Amino acid sequence: MSTPPPARAPLKPLDEMLVELMAFAEPLGRIETVSTFEADGRVLAQDAVSALTVPPRDNSAMDGYAVRCADLAAAAANGSAGLPVSQRIPAGSSGTPLAGGTVARIFTGAPVPEGADAIVMQEDVEAFEQNGQPYARIKAQPQPGQWIRRAGEDVTSGAVVLPRGSRLTPAELGMAATIGLAQLQVAQRPRVALFSTGDELVMPGDVPPEAMRPGAIYNSNRFFLRALLQRAGCKVTDLGIVPDKREATIAALRDASAGHDLILTSGGVSVGEEDHIKPSVQALGHLTLWQVSMKPGKPFAYGRVGQSHFIGLPGNPVSSFVTFMLLVKPFLLKLMGASGRHAQPVLLPARFNWPRPDKRREFLRARRTADGGLELFPNQSSGVLTSAVWGDGLIDNPGSQAIASGDLVKFYSFAEMMG
Ligand code: AMP
Ligand code: MG
């Protein structure tokens, strides 16, 4: 059991905090089988290996005619008007070998008959009949291989099509179906207990705006944290609001620790007299990580209560929102056994000036401009949730670095961070 450093110790840089936090995120290892239909957003727990080749056979990429290029060249040299159409191959059927000196009518997705070496699209063919026999006059000499989709060009039999640890998105679901998988083994959803602390908090719907007592505010964090957890693939137990009292905080943490993989709280994680999270976690378990050097977001705590991980997020809504995406989201993905990249930044030019940066690494709420740059929300206060609604992502600005218009800055989109 490690003792947390004193509150005055230098704040831990975000990168260090993330590395240390991730070291505690042992994959949970619980697996379940779900229908491929229901697997969007889940993490694959087993390699998906293809038992077949896709496409299974060479097939036509066009509605048109399957031909032998050499026959066409010979027919053209003889001044022939056309070649007989010897068979018709719609998608879903399989033809017979192509007789010499003939062509086959063929449709997109239908297997290319043996002996044919190119497809001519129907727009380049004049079809006519002679004595009741269909003929085709090919207007342009095809290249061998033209408009043929090759067997195995998508998937070869035995290939790992989706590795274990893949986060399933609609494209992955389609790919699983392509290789015939109706069900998938995925990581079970992490069970997360969520509560907000703060005597000032009121639930929307409990008190109408005009009747709010002085000092009261609506609980916004509960709504976005719950939605962020659900989007990340968690099963949320929403424990509501816990008052700023030591006994109540301890009782809530103790209850939450049973049957949950993570307890996530917001607020009360500073060192004020009304902040009971830290001593309460220490009373029941231990607190290992404490405070991170970033703005917004300095208050942040990681520890354990019983069998459960504990993460305390700041109360200020923007701080809570940003620390979730940068620290909690990767932690949850690792619990689910996800491999691969988390959100990746892009470099975009600033269309604003930021002359007085903070000493801490900043995550500024910004949005893309039509000309491919970034503009900044004017009020960067950690209490102003409008910045997160107006913005479509965060600029990652190193501590003490001023930004001048035209500078390239690192930008993380909310869509990618939340996805
Ligand atoms: P705390 O971290 O508890 O000191 O709270 C910091 C600030 O965030 C205070 O202004 C709180 O009123 C506000 N705050 C805390 N929790 C919430 C919440 N769930 N929803 C909205 N604001 C909150
Ligand atoms: Mg508070």
Image (cartoon, rainbow, N blue to C red):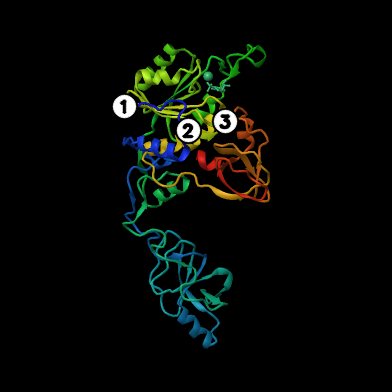
Dot 2 amino acid type: Leu
Mark 2–mark 1 CB contact (< 8 Å)? no
- Residue at left offset 33%, top offset 36%: 26
Decide which of tag 2 and tag 3 comes sooner along the chain. Answer: 2
Mark 2–mark 3 CB contact (< 8 Å)? no
Image coordinates of residue 385 in percent, x first then y, are 61, 30
Image coordinates of residue 133 in percent, x first then y, are 50, 74
Name the disc covering residue 1, or none. 1
- In terms of secondary structure, where does tag 1 sit? loop
Q: Nearer the viewer, residue 83 or 300?
A: 300
Dot 3 amino acid type: Val
- In terms of secondary structure, where does tag 3 sit? helix
**Label 3 belongs to which residue?**
318
Dot 1 amino acid type: Met
Decide if residue 125 is on the left or right side of residue 181: right
The correct choice, above or below, for 384 with respect to 49 in the image is above
Decide which of tag 1 and tag 3 comes sooner along the chain. Answer: 1
Q: Nearer the viewer, residue 38 or 241?
A: 241
Q: Quadrant of residue 317?
A: top right
Q: Nearer the viewer, residue 125 or 344?
A: 344
Mark 1–mark 3 CB contact (< 8 Å)? no
Q: Classify 10 Å Cα crowding around label 1: few (below 14), some (14-19), many (20 and above).
A: few
